[in-house]
Amino acid sequence: MPALHGDLAYFFPSEVLQLLQLSQSTGRLELARESERVDLFLDRGRPVFARTTGLAVRAGEVLMHRGLVAAPALARALERQRVEPHRRIGHLLVEAGDASAQHVREAVHEVLRRIVYGLLLWRDGQFRFVPGEAPGEDIQIDLDLDRLILEGLRVADQERALRQQDGARADAGAGETV
């Protein structure tokens, strides 16, 4: 049974997270909009794990982008994961000797931060907090919520500025004739 629930049109995700931080809450914050859902697990008010049904960068992609895993190794691990869907891609990569446990942890942390950053931008949807639920994951984050919110908003501002620049360039080019 949820202890707290509401509409994100009235309470921004950052406000809900700050309330849960102040109350030192432990449990699962579920946020949903349209066809997307994010589960954010908190331990004494601090985010420790997140998962999403929406589009998100995956740990394997982060490892490849950083040059820490080759595309064929990731493809083999993904194929093996199809046969063993309960296995995490990071575990499979480490087991095969294609990635280090430290690199996998760092990639998972990056993915979890990105999920939370994206969540901070939500302005519609519903939320509910279910106390006491734990993620049951072996790789968790322990982030300072205030720093996470500030960093997420900084990233959002950068993306917004880039979109505005792209829009200004498109507007300037619209009047040109050849």
Image (cartoon, rainbow, N blue to C red):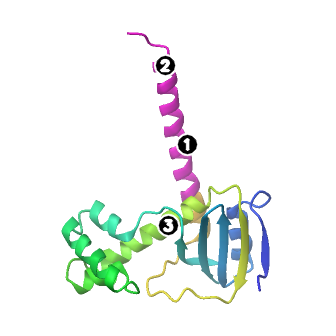
The vertical placement of 171 against 50, above or below, is: above
147 vs 17, left or right, is left
The answer to which of marks 3 and 1 sits earlier in the sequence is: 3
Name the main secondary structure of what is drawn in magenta.
Answer: helix
Where's the C terminus, which quadrant? top left
In percent of width and height, residue 20 lies at 71, 75
Residue highlighted by disc 3:
113
Which residue type does callout 2 highlight?
Answer: Ala
Pointer 2 with pointer 3, Cβ within 8 A: no
Which residue type does callout 3 highlight?
Answer: Arg
Label 1, label 2: how far apart the Cα atoms are: 21 Å
Disc 1 versus disc 2: nearer the observer: 2
Where's the N terminus, which quadrant? bottom right
Q: Residue furthest top?
A: 178
Q: Look at the image and give the residue range highlighted in magenta.
A: 151-178
Residue highlighted by disc 2:
174
The answer to which of marks 2 and 3 sits earlier in the sequence is: 3
